[in-house]
Image (cartoon, coloured by chain):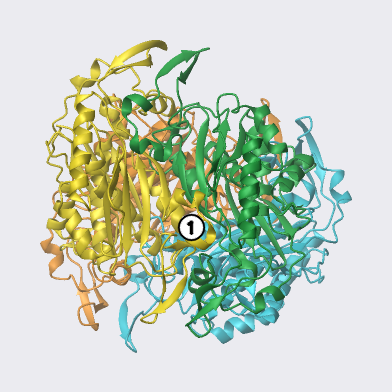
Chain colours: A yellow, B green, C orange, D cyan
Amino acid sequence: MKLEYTVFGESHGPAVGVVVENLPSGIPIDESFISREMNRRRAKGDGLSTPRIEADVPQILSGVFEGKTTGTPLCAVIQNGNTRSGDYDRTKNLARPSHADFTGFVRYKGCNDYRGGGHFSGRLTAPLVFAGAVAKLALREKGIFVGAHILQVGTEKDQPFTADSLAESAFEALAQKDFTVLDDNVGERMKAIIQEARMNLTSVGGIIQCAVIGMPCGVGSPDKDNLEGMIARNIFRVPAVKGIEFGLGFGFASAYGHEVNDEMRMENGEVVTATNHNGGILGGISNGMPIVFQTVIKPTASISREQKTVNLADMQDDTLVIKGRHDPCILSRASVVIESAAALSVLEALS
Amino acid sequence: MKLEYTVFGESHGPAVGVVVENLPSGIPIDESFISREMNRRRAKGDGLSTPRIEADVPQILSGVFEGKTTGTPLCAVIQNGNTRSGDYDRTKNLARPSHADFTGFVRYKGCNDYRGGGHFSGRLTAPLVFAGAVAKLALREKGIFVGAHILQVGTEKDQPFTADSLAESAFEALAQKDFTVLDDNVGERMKAIIQEARMNLTSVGGIIQCAVIGMPCGVGSPDKDNLEGMIARNIFRVPAVKGIEFGLGFGFASAYGHEVNDEMRMENGEVVTATNHNGGILGGISNGMPIVFQTVIKPTASISREQKTVNLADMQDDTLVIKGRHDPCILSRASVVIESAAALSVLEALS
Amino acid sequence: MKLEYTVFGESHGPAVGVVVENLPSGIPIDESFISREMNRRRAKGDGLSTPRIEADVPQILSGVFEGKTTGTPLCAVIQNGNTRSGDYDRTKNLARPSHADFTGFVRYKGCNDYRGGGHFSGRLTAPLVFAGAVAKLALREKGIFVGAHILQVGTEKDQPFTADSLAESAFEALAQKDFTVLDDNVGERMKAIIQEARMNLTSVGGIIQCAVIGMPCGVGSPDKDNLEGMIARNIFRVPAVKGIEFGLGFGFASAYGHEVNDEMRMENGEVVTATNHNGGILGGISNGMPIVFQTVIKPTASISREQKTVNLADMQDDTLVIKGRHDPCILSRASVVIESAAALSVLEALS
Amino acid sequence: MKLEYTVFGESHGPAVGVVVENLPSGIPIDESFISREMNRRRAKGDGLSTPRIEADVPQILSGVFEGKTTGTPLCAVIQNGNTRSGDYDRTKNLARPSHADFTGFVRYKGCNDYRGGGHFSGRLTAPLVFAGAVAKLALREKGIFVGAHILQVGTEKDQPFTADSLAESAFEALAQKDFTVLDDNVGERMKAIIQEARMNLTSVGGIIQCAVIGMPCGVGSPDKDNLEGMIARNIFRVPAVKGIEFGLGFGFASAYGHEVNDEMRMENGEVVTATNHNGGILGGISNGMPIVFQTVIKPTASISREQKTVNLADMQDDTLVIKGRHDPCILSRASVVIESAAALSVLEALS
């Protein structure tokens, strides 16, 4: 039975939530772990992200009994609070550039909830992180762990994962950080870039690098159940993601085969590769090495400068200045979101 | 009813083929177009790709009547010929580095056909191109066209698509070329890189840029039916693909919001964007602009140098020198393959 | 985009609910209609069904904005109340014969919520009826209506649908009845059978006949998207259903072709059939005639007599007397449940 | 990875065939077993079925290597021969009553192959039987066996399965019979009914009873992956099926709970039920008892009497006399077809 998850809700509706089907039975619901994960996604009020701070306490409605997953559909909801819908009424017909206001308007025939991005809001990543936390608890039982860090913000780059940082303890250390970088000095420079973007009434993008360790070999398929394809499909369900690459990724374009082929050898009775340029997946199937991928997150589309746009009420050219509360960069909150989508993908592939 | 396709076959088995379900009814099967497309994928014997040249004539077994698609499952098969299985017997237990030999061995419990890569062979892209050609014929009826070119080989880069080259006639001109680049001078330098790789007993990677024009607005969804996710999932089903990005893609990482937001305006009664950094998709839904994505293809894993590997028969370290016929670079054949996966994805999203 | 629905919840957990994906946008949420439908499913305290009476007011959490469906996932939850879990503690390890206690125990590795049947409870049909009501509102816009009546209880049989009763007004009249039969005299005799079963500490089964009128021709497919198969799959998701037949159904076994073939003719520019023995579906595709099917519902498995069973705690033979509140027959509440599953199936086939 | 199968082809096209995805790896392809199964479906020229006799030798194109399934998609095709398309040209526009001619015409916009029923032909059950034979070989390795017999033809009824006939050896004995009944005397009377129907230029329906033994407990789910729903969906993909019931099925309607509840007890360390009125499935999950279901097959729609119909070319009333070769009853060939769909369903549920 294949794991599947569905997020629902609108930013300014009654609640957001998630249903996860075909979870394994008997996974202990470690509430402090889940709470920690929810906290990692939450805005900190530190100027790096939106001042909209919410409690984000997921209420489990089903699928958990006596502290463990039952295996039946698990639904959790997070009530929406602290919404200032008035912020949006003034500009409700002005499609925000690079947002889904216009595409959502067409797709849903003008019926979708425009307030705060509605169903397209980054707020939908809160239930995703909840579901991801449960998936991580299930993977933990199998010795599989997921970690992520901010690889790039603007032009500033963190060091990539190495053998040392591809370890459960290193992932745990990352998860404890407010700003998930391997090199904190780089992190400070990234923060400066984000603050500068805020000052300049703009936003900035970045890259998250995510890894899965302890993955057994032989999971996936070359065609429809391609492991890279399954992960990619789920990662693109995260708002603002515009690309994904595995291992060396786009770096393969300028590489030669003899430089980047992953030679193999036996080590402690296991087949390992000397390098891991392929990011743990060959032919759509895991090879037992860490799964490593990078995903790019575009600059927050909400910026405070005047922009040219279209008024959807009368289909005329117009201009827009977005007010309200927005992250100048969502990278500081994105690591746990990407980890969550990755954890759910891996659990799906194993189901 | 959702379009779905399944490729089947092994490189050295009786045949490879494809079944496409839920095609539209009544699409004229333009045999010369299909033949042209099959030719584009075929090795040319020009030193840029494998000397294994095959007729690759797909036989349609079902789903076509009186020259048009019926709408029932369309199956086409391509007989395998010109196979020299003997090339593989000597090395059957030596897992080729960066190939799926080892992962396939584990996934299929040692039962998969190892000859020529078996089900993982690039040969499976022949039926994919057939299916893609039929999808293009269906899209053509809706005024939708798909084109692709080699954006990069090694360090050599073609110009990206511009408004001028995002046109049916420009796509047609590209499809007529043996080496699908916009700038033929760059193409010559790319060919030189490929020839040099061959001489050096190695291989080289590259990037394909693909575009879909005429796409209606409002197709896709933010979550499970995310248009970027649907395309990505299918693109990763193509062997050797290691990444995909839409629009500016990984370039978003070092960009600021005010630089890359796509401002909107009315033009001839349609909403258009001044720029198309988002590659035609916002919130997982098409916005009516050209869909543009780049996908990276790793250097051919088969190289003629000695490599360290593992013998799957006795699970001992070993070394391997791959003989047989191999492309030093598959980019010259990949444009039409990527176009095919894109065409099928778009038709799926519209179904 | 294909409509899909997922029910979640456990009988004695915090809530039950449903998520419906890919509903059409802009369907007005007629609250009084939904309330009427919820009422139809509710136990009446009339001795025909369980004394457990609940308010069953669904709270819509997402997918509705300004009184209309948005088209994004619609989630509604119904809080559980009036649960007397103590009723179940005494017998928690005694698998109730013909219930899913034992199969659920094995499937979910002993982790499922056993109280009140948990996820297997008929209570899960409350959110199903909510989802069905929304689906009916969507179908109504297309001139499609769904109705059902109790065709049989014990040996007592209602008249089957005829041309006269296959009409919107007739469906409406049925929906207004507390006991949904076409012939109220038969209904009284059915009620007597049910009361008698209660007196005898047993339960009784029956048959629901359901019809869909206004269905356009040409919906469905012979194979995977077979309309009969899609309806059947969803009907079997309703607890206690043990069979489904279309049109003459099992009556075809003893029939001759010349007696039961549905001859065709033109009528008002439409193709119609003189008879409708095939229940509106040929080759898995609707033919424009009313879709008519019967589904059998087994006697409530909970009966108050002593039964032999197995104790799941020690895997020993044991005996059980079920206490608590139970319907002696669920037919009086089942019409609207079957209609709901049918409405969702038809909307899925049209999506 | 979920098993899925797709049949393709048209009765008078080049070939019919099937693709099966996600079969287990390493299943030995027992060709004599497959050939035996194909023979069971084949018309015998004994007056009980169509005189169109074909060789029906499936050619395996993929997914088998060195005599065993690889686990990659298995495609097999059966060339069409012995087609007399001329039989159909005269009546090509006359929609045959109770056939899918009209619904297929609408569904496929007039583009489907009308000859011999095209994609709706019973001939498509040949590749289904092939796929079912492979599924049976896979189930055999798990100690699971599938059998079926003709339970009813016209008013003549075979004895139902009993504990004695629910055994591998009994299934094998049935499979060896030309006319698969448990009681051969009843079989002779059934044959007489069929011959009489032929004489009377009509056809007759019947019921197949099918069972799966050795099924492990705990397979399936209450909702989307409901085992009854999965089997039902696949059974309705078989042409002419109009109903399915599990265990006592429609007999539950007139039964009382205390009569039909399946009491439980321990036997050799296993939970068993004293009776099996629920046909081995409770709450959509197998309970370890034999899965038993009945499915009704309508009288062959092709009869040689004049019938009223509609001419699809000019949409006028018309009359039709069907010529050509037709089964007066397909029950004698249907047992193996139903077994095949059941075997594939069970293997899907286990995958």
When the figure is inspected, residue C56 is found, relative to residue B116, above or below; the finding is: above
Structural crowding at the residue carrying mark 1, measured as other residues with C-alpha within 10 Å and reported as few (<14), some (14–19) or many (≥20):
many
Q: Position of residue D269 (x, y in %)?
A: 32, 87
Q: Nearer the viewer, residue B225 or B307?
A: B307
When the figure is inspected, residue D334 is found, relative to residue B268, above or below; the finding is: below
The amino acid marked with disc number 1 is Asn
Q: Is residue B302 left or right of residue A177?
A: right
The N terminus of chain A lies in which quarter of the figure?
A: bottom left
Q: Secondary structure at mark 1?
A: loop
When the figure is inspected, residue A47 is found, relative to residue B345, above or below; the finding is: above
Q: Nearer the viewer, residue D229 or B96?
A: B96
| Residue occupying image coordinates x 44% and y 70% | D279
Find the residue positioned furthest to the bottom.
D268
Q: Is residue C205 left or right of residue D211?
A: left
Residue D156 showing in the rendered view = no
When the figure is inspected, residue D124 is found, relative to residue C24, above or below; the finding is: below
| Residue occupying image coordinates x 57% and y 87% | D169
Q: Position of residue B159 (x, y in %)?
A: 56, 33
The C terminus of chain A lies in which quarter of the figure?
A: bottom left
Q: Nearer the viewer, residue D103 or C33?
A: D103
Residue D267 showing in the rendered view = yes
Please state the chain letter of the residue tagged with numbered disc 1 in the rendered image: A
| Residue occupying image coordinates x 85% and y 61% | D82
Q: Position of residue D148 (x, y in %)?
A: 59, 73
Q: Position of residue D181 (x, y in %)?
A: 64, 76
| Residue occupying image coordinates x 82% and y 67% | D53
Question: Would you identify the image quadrant in which residue A326 lies?
Answer: top left
Q: Residue at label 1?
A: A226
Q: Nearer the viewer, residue D234 or B314?
A: B314
Q: Is residue A301 left or right of residue C246?
A: left
Question: Would you identify the image quadrant in which residue D300 lies?
Answer: bottom right
